[in-house]
Amino acid sequence: MRLFGKHSQGVDAEKAAKREGTETDIEKGNVELVESVNEELDDDTESEQVYTCSDCGVTLPLKEMKKNLYVCPKCGKHTKISARRRMAGLADPGTFRKIRFTIPFHNPLDYPEYEEKITGLKTKTGLDEGVLSGVCEIEGYKAVVAVMAPEFLMGSMGVAVGEMITKTFEVAEKQELPVIIFTASGGARMQEGILSLMQMAKTSAAVQRFSENGGLYISVLTHPTTGGVSASFATLADITIAEPGALIGFAGPRVIEQTIGQKLPKGFQRAEYLEEHGFVDGIVSRLEMRDQLAQLLRLHEKRRKSWLR
């Protein structure tokens, strides 16, 4: 796997002319970069709540877990973190600008109460859909970052999520910025049937176009990254990183065992097993993720400047 995106020394004239003659979704207004509002992430009730680690059994105030990015300070277990909190812990203060997408609601199967569920989740999470995407700086290095939201229907990928991921790459290409995506998903969204599966091809094509035009794409696989997301854009990056202990695979281990009638190897589909077998480039703690990503962006920027000389 390449350490850096394939960057062209010069832009092909024919491709450039084609791009110049095509009105993009950004120009049409379907994608809008907006200044970030004050994202209030604090919850006053957290000071009264406690967290008990399911691995080591330690109990501590939830506010301490928040300060530690929801990583157990005793055993290092990485627990669930919302998209907004992850973004707040990653971006330099005051630099995040959210990408606002104009995507109509889709319910192709007339799934009962689906629209009500989506509306409720938008209110509860403060998100437009299962992805939070925007432009920000990480230790001074600018990038387009998308974070999948496990709190929004398990980060499942339907038409809206597929469109948001695709437009994220288009915004990055237009602004000539690297892309970083944090994946967390249960797979395709069953409420949207075959249209949800089509997003695998759509997002994969978006990655391919971005790569062909010299973009750097870094994928961070978090727990869980499964189903159609793991079989598409999540595993097509130039650099693939995983959080410790993350479950990464297509079907779940129990489904596989029931299908083949055999026990799977210990740790199968976990980040450590996949690193050992060359599926991911490295495992990085959430507490070190910001620094590691900044180093990668710094190296990329240094190399990119050398190309432009």
Image (cartoon, rainbow, N blue to C red):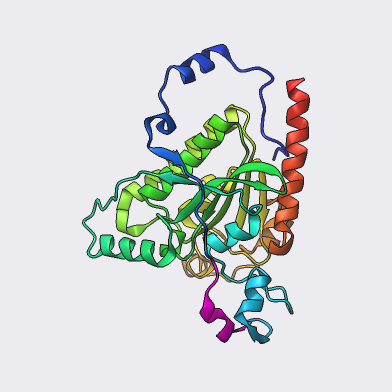
Front in this rendered view, residue 135 or 306: 135
Q: In this view, does 134 lie to the left or right of 125?
A: right
Seen in the picture, residue 3 relative to 27 is either above or below; the reply is: below
Residue 123 part of the magenta-drawn span? no
Seen in the picture, residue 98 relative to 8 is either above or below; the reply is: below
Front in this rendered view, residue 183 or 186: 183
Position in image of residue 86 (x %, y %): 59, 61
Q: In the picture, residue 215 is in which quadrant?
A: top right
Which residue lies at the image location 70% right of the left edge and 57% below the top edge?
289
Q: Is residue 119 visible?
A: yes
Q: Is residue 224 visible?
A: no
Position in image of residue 200 (x %, y %): 44, 45
Q: Give the range drawn in magenta.
A: 41-52
Q: Quadrant of the C terminus?
A: top right
Q: In the picture, residue 71 is in which quadrant?
A: bottom right
Q: In this view, does 286 lie to the left or right of 253?
A: right
Position in image of residue 89 (x %, y %): 64, 60
Front in this rendered view, residue 34 or 27: 34
Position in image of residue 212 (x %, y %): 58, 28
Which residue lies at the image location 66% right of the left edge and 52% below the top edge?
92
